[in-house]
Amino acid sequence: MYDINFFSIYKKRRAKNNGFRIFVLVFLALFVLVNALLIGGGLLLFNKMEQSINEKTEYINSSDTKAKIDAAAKTKSEAELTAKYLTLLQAASDKYNQLDIVDSALLNDLRKLTPMTTAFTASSLIGNSLDLQCQSSNNTDPLDMYHALLGSPLFTNVILGQLNTDAANGVTSFTISLQIVGGEQP
């Protein structure tokens, strides 16, 4: 007689399900292991980043770095000041280049007619009109210069103006206005 086992069918099904159960258990174990590694790696990376941030904060807050930052700020302000100074110098240079300068031949002609003890302190040339401010250590020089300019064929309408004598210093200041012959009309 044969022993009939009614539960054998279930045992066979269990044997078939054991492979699937093992697969699920291995998958779960690997899943937990990978997640544990990811969490551990993330925490390690986070700690390294936090340590790097702390090191950089200490570097920024150190007195040596603050001194370097202050020196850089001072250098920057000096560079800006130098740039402004350069701009002003360039503007002054441009204005200087635009000035009307008395021609050297004219200046030489004037110098020939000027007494040795007389010096020009200022001049203004507008068109063919020339105004000279002079100083002399000799009281007769203004009249000598005036007569020399009157006798010159290069100048007309010579006018001697403002004659001031400073007896304490022995200096005579005077102005002469004249027209240059053949000069440009204003």
Image: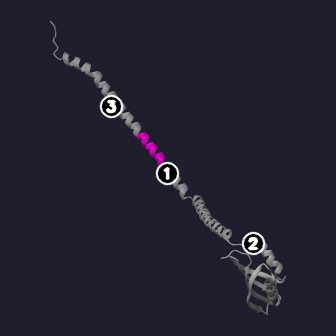
Dot 1 alpha-carbon crowd within 10 angstroms: few under 14, some 14 to 19, many 20 or more: few
- Residue at 28 percent across and 23 percent down: it is 20
SS label for mark 1: helix
Q: Which residue corresponds to mark 1?
A: 53
Going from the N terminus, do you reach mark 2 or mark 1 first? 1
Q: Position of residue 142 (x, y in %)?
A: 79, 87
SS label for mark 2: loop
Does 159 sit above or below residue 128? below
Amino acid type of the residue tagged 2 in the rendering: Asp
- Residue extending furthest bottom? 167
Q: Position of residue 76 (x, y in %)?
A: 59, 62
- Give the alpha-carbon distance from disc 3 to disc 1, as whole Å: 37 Å
Tell me which segment is drawn in magenta. Answer: 39-51
Which label sits in the foreground, 2 or 1? Answer: 2
- Is 121 included in the stretch rendered in magenta? no
Q: Please tell me which residue lies in front, 185 or 103.
A: 185
Going from the N terminus, do you reach mark 3 or mark 2 first? 3
Q: Which residue corresponds to mark 2?
A: 103
**Residue 28, label in figure:** 3
Rendered image quadrant of residue 96: bottom right
- Residue at 34 percent across and 27 percent down: it is 26
Left or right side of 177 for 137: right
Marks 3,1: beta carbons within 8 A: no
- Residue at 35 percent across and 31 percent down: it is 29
Amino acid type of the residue tagged 3 in the rendering: Leu
Going from the N terminus, do you reach mark 3 or mark 1 first? 3
Q: Please tell me which residue lies in front, 53 or 32.
A: 53
Amino acid type of the residue tagged 1 in the rendering: Ile
Marks 2,1: beta carbons within 8 A: no
SS label for mark 3: helix
Dot 2 alpha-carbon crowd within 10 angstroms: few under 14, some 14 to 19, many 20 or more: few
